[in-house]
Structure formats: C-alpha cells, structure tokens
C-alpha cells in the first residue's frame, strides 16, 4: 500500500466524508494537513478539497469512492 497524506479543511463536510471512508477501509494517512493553516496549500487547493496525495506525487481528488481509493492506494 502506498503512503499518502490527507489534505483537508476544518469544518468541511466533504472532508469528513472522506475521513469516514478512510476509517471504514482501515487505512490511515501518514500525515493530515489543513489548508486553513498553510498559505501554500491554500494557494494550491483553495476549496478543492479533500485531496489524498501519495509520496510519489500522485493525487486523488474528491469525489472518489472506495473502489477509486483502493486503486489509488495500490490495494
């Protein structure tokens, strides 16, 4: 399975849905980063979150489902 980080916002219902999906699949990001706290992330993503970003630079942007998530993670 690929390592990945979870890029999200605070108080974001879509981000909460993505987090719940990760929990249900029993996968955890290596790091969670909040766009709200990071000017570079804010500039790069704005309101286009949640995003999962692997260490190889590949990204999975919302909307995604369990099938896309598993494929992204290399399961």
Image: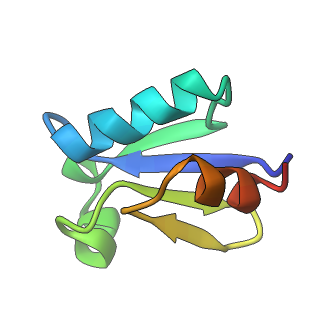
**What residue is shown at x 48% (from left), y 38% (from top)?**
32
Q: How far across and how far down the image is residue 9, in percent?
A: 24, 45
Tag count: 0
Q: Is 74 left, or right, of 71 in this rendering?
A: right
Q: Is 65 left, or right, of 15 in this rendering?
A: right
Q: How far across and how far down the image is residue 4, in percent?
A: 67, 50
Which residue is more in the foreground, 29 or 14?
14
Which residue is more in the foreground, 71 or 30?
71
Q: Residue furthest left?
A: 11
Q: Is 25 left, or right, of 51 in this rendering?
A: right
**What residue is shown at x 46% (from left), y 59% (from top)?**
64
- Above-or-below relation of 32 to 4: above
In the picture, residue 19 is in which quadrant? Answer: top left
Way the structure is coloured: rainbow
- Above-or-below relation of 52 to 58: above
- Above-or-below relation of 37 to 55: above
**What residue is shown at x 33% (from left), y 64% (from top)?**
41
Q: How far across and how far down the image is residue 13, in percent?
A: 18, 39
**What residue is shown at x 48% (from left), y 34% (from top)?**
21
Which residue is more in the foreground, 57 or 20?
20
């Amino acid at each position: 399975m690929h390592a990945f980080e979870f890029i999200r916002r605070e108080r974001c219902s879509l981000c909460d849905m993505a987090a719940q999906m990760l929990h249900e699949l029993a996968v955890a990001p290596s790091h969670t980063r909040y766009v709200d706290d990071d000017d570079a992330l804010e500039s790069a993503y704005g309101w286009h979150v949640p995003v999962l970003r692997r260490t190889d630079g590949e990204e999975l942007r919302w909307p995604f489902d369990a099938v896309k998530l598993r494929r992204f993670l290399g399961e």
